[in-house]
Image (cartoon, helix red, strand yellow):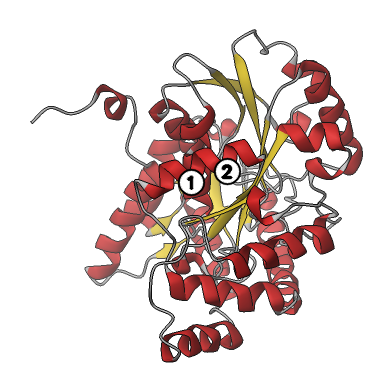
Amino acid sequence: MQIAQRVKKVAPSLTLTITARAKELKKSGLDVVGFGAGEPDFDTPDYIKQAAKESLDKGQTKYTPVTGLQELKEIICKKFKDENGLEYIPDQIAVSCGAKHSLYNYFQAVINPGDEVLVPVPYWVSYPPQILMADGIPVYIPTDSETDYKITPELLDKYVTLKTKGCILNSPSNPSGMMYTEDELRALADYFVAKNIPVISDEIYEHISYDFPHVSIASFNDDIKQLTTVINGVSKSFSMTGWRIGYMASSIDVIKAVNKIQGHSTSNPTTTAQWATIAALNGGLDFVRTMCVEFKKRRDYMVDRLNSIKGMSCIMPQGAFYAYPSIAEIGMDSMKFCQRLLEEYQTAAVPGVAFGNDENIRLSYAVSMDAIKKGLDRIDKFVNNL
């Protein structure tokens, strides 16, 4: 059977490949430490699960409007106002089946064949494939530890063309964990406004920050707000990864386009999960603050250990729950490093090549401290025995 050319442009996810192999080894009886986790290791809070149960008992199991319950959209607008200083109306909100789905819908809605989207490197694995599936062109902007894996207006200027139709901004970042300061964001906002470049601001990790608070680039003024589509969800902040609820805030025209796309693909997100999300957003941020306290302890330990391993170095991530150490001095590509680490020392890490940078690996500290200590002991032994 014929396979569409746009699908052939897309490579399989390396993160899923490593995860699948780690599961195979674990199933065979080996003691595998997995640093590939892209989700908190905390359970969804009880009050959220209770809200889901109550929705079922009330018979709230039917279709909802395609882009989400009106009640949920109103709560999302309140969240944006209270937490981000952003004013939206429900018609500017679309609720989808996860933040990944929101991003996919956005690119399908706004990208035409040949349009270019600026993608800072390292990037989350799904950005380039989603752009390619919309017949767009990812334009990669290299960064490194010297720039804290962040872009600047001066760097952007080297890659902007007449075909540039957007720039992705992910703060806190997956995979680097780095965050933009308010001053850095203001400089970028001024540049985007001057060049009239739309911004896709992926803020899914906004509340998982340790050293300074997250700021949304859309919050500075109306000019940058009108250019920005904010992507968010409840997966990380409320440990609801499997509930599959994400949302976007954008112009009414973009939301109308997303409504068409979603109406002919998934229709509404799961009704029960929407009612659970209402409870989550109404329940405050105590839960995520508790997680952050624990994540910070793990972060500090992991980065300190990584920097003590000969041939490895790691900058201190300011948010999310990933460390992104360099293995450049070891002289091995990231895929081979991770394959050998998994097969020989039963420790799973994600190769940096999956994020566009072959001199790094990604380690999640959304695992127990015992697992972190055991896994880092193995990495230390592996590197020293090379």
Percent of width and height locating residue 4: 23, 26
Residue at the disc numbered 2:
255
Percent of width and height locating residue 216: 79, 47
Q: At x 39% / y 55%, what residue is drawn?
A: 267
Disc 1 marks a residue whose amino acid type is: Asn
Residue 274 in the figure: left or right of residue 297: left
The residue at the far top in this view is: 162
Q: Is residue 316 visible?
A: yes
Q: Quadrant of the N terminus?
A: top left
Q: Nearer the viewer, residue 13 or 32?
A: 13
Pointer 2: residues within 10 angstroms few (<14), some, or many (20+)? many
**Is 129 rendered above or below residue 295?**
above
Per the model, the C-alpha gap separating discs 1 and 2 is 6 Å
Q: Secondary structure at mark 1?
A: helix
Total number of numbered labels?
Answer: 2
Pointer 1: residues within 10 angstroms few (<14), some, or many (20+)? many
Q: Nearer the viewer, residue 229 or 6?
A: 229
Percent of width and height locating residue 274: 52, 70
Dot label at residue 259: 1
Disc 2 marks a residue whose amino acid type is: Ile
Dot label at residue 126: none
- Label 1–label 2 contact, CB within 8 A: yes
Percent of width and height locating residue 220: 88, 41
Q: Quadrant of the C terminus?
A: top left
Q: At x 38% / y 42%, what residue is drawn?
A: 14
**Is 304 rendered above or below residue 151?**
below
